[in-house]
Image (cartoon, rainbow, N blue to C red):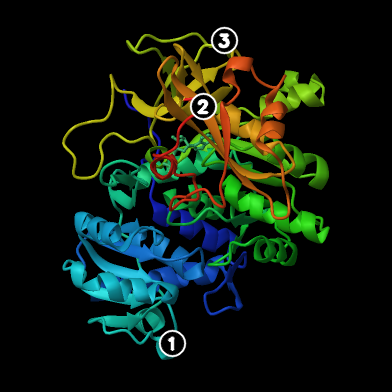
Amino acid sequence: MLGLMQNHPLLISSLIDHAERHHGDGQIVSRRVEGDIHHSTWGQVASRARQVAHALDAAALPQASRVATLAWNGYRHLELYYGVSGSGRVLHTLNPRLHPEQLAWIVNHAEDSVVCFDTTFAPLVAAVHAKCPTVKLWVALCDADKLPDIAVPNLVSYEAWIGTQPRTYTWPMLDENAASSLCYTSGTTGNPKGVLYSHRSSVLHSFAATMPDALNLSARDSLLPVVPMFHVNAWGIPYAGAAVGCKLVFPGPAMDGKSIYELIEAEGVTMAAGVPTVWQMLLGHMQTAGLTFSTMKRTVIGGSACPPAMLSTFQDSYGVEVLHAWGMTEMSPLGTVCTLKNKQLALDANGQLKVRLKQGRAVYGVDMKIVDAEGAELPWDGKTFGDLLVRGPWIIDHYFKSDSSPLVDGWFPTGDVATIDADGFMQITDRSKDVIKSGGEWISSIDVENIAMAHPAVAMAACVGMPHPKWDERPIVVVVLKPGQDISREDLLAFYEGRIAKWQIPDDVVFVPAIPLGATGKMQKMSLRQQLKEYVLPGM
Ligand code: AMP
């Protein structure tokens, strides 16, 4: 017997319809590439998204065509999120920080028909357009009189393209399993792989993201996604924000500490989301200038492990609650968020900090387990670590245009190594390829990095394993010092004493001016290992 409830498909268009109807005057604020601060509303975004849908119809773009963006976080990008997916096309968010060759490869693999780009990326478009034969239209996200002077055929300004289109449109009643957006993984090895989200997966993910023990979003929030809209849909914030009708504040291209701080203060930001490297810049600016927050209450930190020193600084010096979160492009991305359970509120500050540093508990909808090399499930004791596997309705089944499934018995292997404690708090010990194998034991590169990062002279630290004839591998720590700071190799190694088991203390410290960062702000250990290929461990 079937239930007798209405069978409404879960569609992305329903999110913008809701935001417009119930939060039509809710603000959308954007720092633009033009340099100014632009003010829009959910109502205006909805109206202009419908113009986008008309413009795509006028271009005779069939359903499921890929419409790419090469853009910072901003209101026009948000309009495309809804106009493209809402009308049945697939929004493909390109990462502008990729190498042009890789970008062209992705455009061709996705068979993008249209590319909408911020004028900052005009030189990039000029460099790649000839290598992208599937693209029929290049849309510069600007006013008609600001069209960049580049020799690219079929180039139009966004405002001219949508400006004359009607503001009313009936969103199609799509199958909720239809593809809505496409995002390629960072691809540290081999070619990038496309993750194709559906309307259903995106809407369910939005419900989950807003929950109190997840991002705890409400209509009272002013939310700043520093995480780019070209990286896993800015962690789903453009969708979840519409579901609750919160104010959204977009940083555009200015991700430096000063610009982010000014935006937080000017727009009454209560909650911000980003990777640790971005927050490092913000905290650095605030510490140097002696600033405090007046409205900011919490921040979601994910993408890579949040160093303990950063968590303490946010909480103790600035009164900002840190929500440590973990996820992946393949997971839309939300998997776990670290919020305390009732019984943990009784712990002292240090006990609570230990819990908060974990990547957190599974959000309802995500199931997870850890397994050994043979695939046998491991205990949730907070000590035993193994390969982390996940499953759920917003987790990948297949990569785009790939016949083979990455799943193992219905579970997606994340490539992360983790522990899970009896309360269900998961802690990442490493990427499986970064873990250091020394004398048959594993050393967590994250642990080694976190200790170095806790030293006041250290700005950034990366731990890598170096080949060793006896121990297989030994860890070394590669360090970037804060400006004007100095510390010797011996002093930093002494700092590890008592903080980690003796055999886990790195064998050496290598000081460098910078650590290579990838397109999404994560440390690139592959390139770092490449840079260190002439390196020899002390005494060898
Ligand atoms: P991406 O698909 O580019 O978002 O990368 C996903 C990977 O980032 C995960 O598999 C983890 O290795 C890493 N990651 C994400 N969040 C965290 C976190 N909070 N702590 C440690 N690693 C993380």
Q: Which residue is drawn at 65% across and 50% down?
A: 280
Q: Position of residue 144 (x, y in %)?
A: 40, 88
Q: Which residue is drawn at 57% across and 12% down?
A: 383
Sequence order check, earlier mark of 1 and 3: 1
Q: Which mark is drawn over residue 381?
A: 3
Quarter occupied by residue 357? top right
Please name the residue that numbered disc 1 is placed on.
146
Q: Which amino acid does label 1 sit on?
A: Lys
Could you tell whether 199 is left or right of 456 in the image? Answer: left
Q: What residue type is labelled 2?
A: Pro
Q: Position of residue 205 (x, y in %)?
A: 46, 41
Query: Tags 1 and 3 in contact by the CB under 8 Å rule?
Result: no
Please name the residue that numbered disc 2 is placed on.
475
Q: Residues within 10 Å of mark 3 (few under 14, many from 20)?
A: some
The image shows residue 165, relative to residue 249, as above or below, that is: below
Task: Find out if the beta carbon at label 2 lies less than 8 Å from the nearest ligand 1 atom.
Answer: no
- The answer to whether residue 110 is visible is yes
The image shows residue 366, relative to residue 178, as above or below, that is: above
Sequence order check, earlier mark of 3 and 2: 3
Q: Where is residue 312 in the image (x, y as percent from the top left)?
A: 75, 37
Is the N terminus in the top left, top right, bottom left or bottom right quadrant? Answer: top left
**SS under mark 3:** loop
Work out whether residue 160 or residue 109 is closer to the camera in this orientation and state it.
109
Per the model, the C-alpha gap separating discs 3 and 2 is 26 Å
**SS under mark 1:** helix
Q: Which residue is drawn at 61% across and 36% down?
A: 324
Q: Which amino acid does label 3 sit on?
A: Asp
Per the model, the C-alpha gap separating discs 1 and 3 is 59 Å
Q: Residue at x 20, y 59 (%)?
A: 108
Query: Tags 1 and 2 in contact by the CB under 8 Å rule?
Result: no
Q: Which mark is drawn over residue 31?
A: none
